[in-house]
Image (tube, helix red, strand yellow):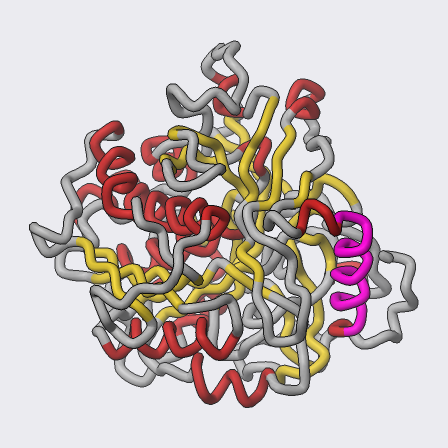
């Protein structure tokens, strides 16, 4: 599928890729899962890490899929770093990066301890996770984070209409996504409040309605860990759901390698790519490269076929909106710890990856950085302060006619955008 001529519309490439995946994995898609190939990170031992997609791939235009990938076997980078020999799929203890690792990697240790009080991060996902609050409590308790419950006013779960009682039907795959999102918000901004807004289905219309509800409830930071094929309807979706000045809206760039997705392509959002993150002997203590497992698995990126280019994005190879803007860890082989107990996927502790991890991380960095100025476009902020980011300069997520669309380089590139957080400086404005 990657050999399709580059002149074909990107949305068509995406839907052809989806159709191919559906044909090849029809039986598994009926259960909402597809099995990923083994990771092929630079460390040979991490090639043993396997994972599965939490949600079904989109079957129709206007349908979204979550970008969460659950590790099913092998030893993660965290386990190798700490000499842990247990398989990552064993659910009795964490096997991925925790809050301390993530804050250290992105220069957020002091900010996480001191910032965020009174600020609300909204998590937008489809369907209901009945165990969301109890699983969140288990994660936060294990890592010594302050309690975040309905009773103390920190946590709130509502439907796309704002109801706390008339919630959507439950879904095991999306429940894993919800746990991932809640845990990443907690890891980065433990003093923030969290509002979970659950759409009644994975359609863009319902998820978009949930975004609007999140903003109406007062959230200034809204994380969206899902995506689907581009379409001619995207401009309508943009104005209906994502045009919220003064609100930082983050969206996953996708997990299928090179190729643009929506709503990451919206000019009103911060599109978040994914990296492989490993501890190192560098001054920073960590190194990052573009996350790529295979030609069909890795961080998304690309030049939109429909969405107009925002004025603050100045790369010259793409006349329309370019994905991504910034990035954070997403490789399942260097994944993050999550606690989830709902449904067939909910075995307790698990390691997750995908740009579903990076999107809530970046939303939470915005929250630590402070309330965006009235009328501002928070997606613009990193472009004004590139020195406050870790520039990711190695790796690629596929083959493309214009090199930086899919290959890392010094400065801006598609797979990692301008880079990853180095403190809060690039996320204020």
Q: In the displayed image of the protein, which residue is found farthest to the left?
A: 152
- Residue drawn at x 65%, y 47% is 393
Question: Can see residue 363?
Answer: yes
Residue 351 in the figure: left or right of residue 5: left
Reply above or below: 354 against 413: above
User: What secondary structure characterizes most of the magenta part?
Assistant: helix
Query: Which is more toward the observer, 92 or 305?
Result: 92
Q: Which residues are magenta?
A: 12-25
Query: Which is more toward the observer, 2 or 286?
Result: 2
Rendered location of residue 40, percent (x, y): 72, 31
Residue 202 in the figure: left or right of residue 138: right
Query: Which is more toward the observer, 123 or 362?
Result: 123
User: Is residue 17 in the magenta section?
Assistant: yes
User: Is residue 64 in the magenta section?
Assistant: no
Rendered location of residue 352, percent (x, y): 50, 38
- Residue drawn at x 70%, y 43% is 292
- Residue drawn at x 61%, y 35% is 51
Question: Can see residue 418?
Answer: no
Name the image quarter holding the C terminus: bottom left
């Amino acid at each position: 599928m990657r050999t399709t001529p580059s002149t074909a519309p990107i949305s068509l490439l995406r839907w052809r890729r989806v159709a191919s995946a559906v044909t090849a994995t029809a039986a598994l898609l009926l259960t909402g899962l597809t099995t990923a190939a083994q990771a092929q990170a630079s460390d040979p031992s991490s090639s043993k890490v396997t994972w599965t997609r939490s949600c079904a791939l989109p079957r129709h235009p206007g349908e979204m899929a979550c970008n969460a990938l659950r590790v099913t076997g092998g030893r993660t980078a965290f386990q190798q770093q700490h000499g842990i020999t247990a398989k990552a799929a064993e659910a009795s203890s964490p096997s991925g990066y925790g809050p301390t690792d993530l804050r250290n990697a992105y220069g957020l240790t002091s900010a996480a301890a001191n910032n965020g009080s009174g600020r609300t991060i909204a998590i937008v996902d489809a369907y209901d996770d009945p165990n969301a609050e109890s699983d969140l409590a288990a994660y936060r308790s294990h890592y010594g984070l302050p309690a975040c419950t309905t009773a103390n006013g920190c946590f709130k779960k509502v439907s796309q209409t704002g109801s706390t009682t008339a919630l959507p039907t439950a879904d095991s795959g999306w429940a894993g996504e919800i746990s991932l999102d809640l845990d990443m918000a907690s890891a980065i901004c433990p003093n923030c409040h969290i509002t979970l807004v659950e759409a009644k289905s994975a359609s863009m219309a319902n998820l978009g309605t949930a975004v609007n509800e999140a903003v109406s409830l007062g959230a200034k930071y809204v994380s969206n860990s899902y995506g689907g094929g581009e379409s001619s309807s995207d401009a309508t979706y943009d104005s209906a759901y994502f045009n919220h000045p003064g609100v930082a809206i983050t969206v996953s760039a996708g997990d299928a390698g090179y190729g643009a997705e929506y709503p990451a392509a919206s000019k009103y959002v911060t599109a978040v790519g994914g990296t492989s993150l490993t501890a190192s002997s560098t001054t920073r203590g960590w190194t990052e490269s573009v996350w790529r497992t295979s030609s069909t698995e890795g961080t998304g990126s690309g030049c939109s076929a429909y969405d107009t280019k925002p004025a603050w994005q100045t790369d010259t190879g793409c006349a329309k909106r370019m994905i991504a803007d910034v990035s954070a860890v997403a490789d399942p082989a260097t994944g993050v710890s999550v606690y989830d107990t709902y449904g067939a996927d909910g075995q307790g502790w698990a390691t997750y990856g995908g740009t579903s991890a990076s999107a809530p991380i970046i939303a939470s960095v915005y929250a630590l950085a402070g309330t965006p100025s009235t009328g501002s476009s928070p997606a613009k902020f990193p472009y004004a302060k590139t020195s406050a980011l870790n520039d990711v300069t190695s790796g690629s997520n596929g083959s493309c006619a214009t090199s930086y669309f899919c290959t890392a380089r010094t400065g801006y590139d598609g797979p990692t955008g301008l880079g990853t957080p180095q403190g809060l400086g690039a996320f204020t404005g």
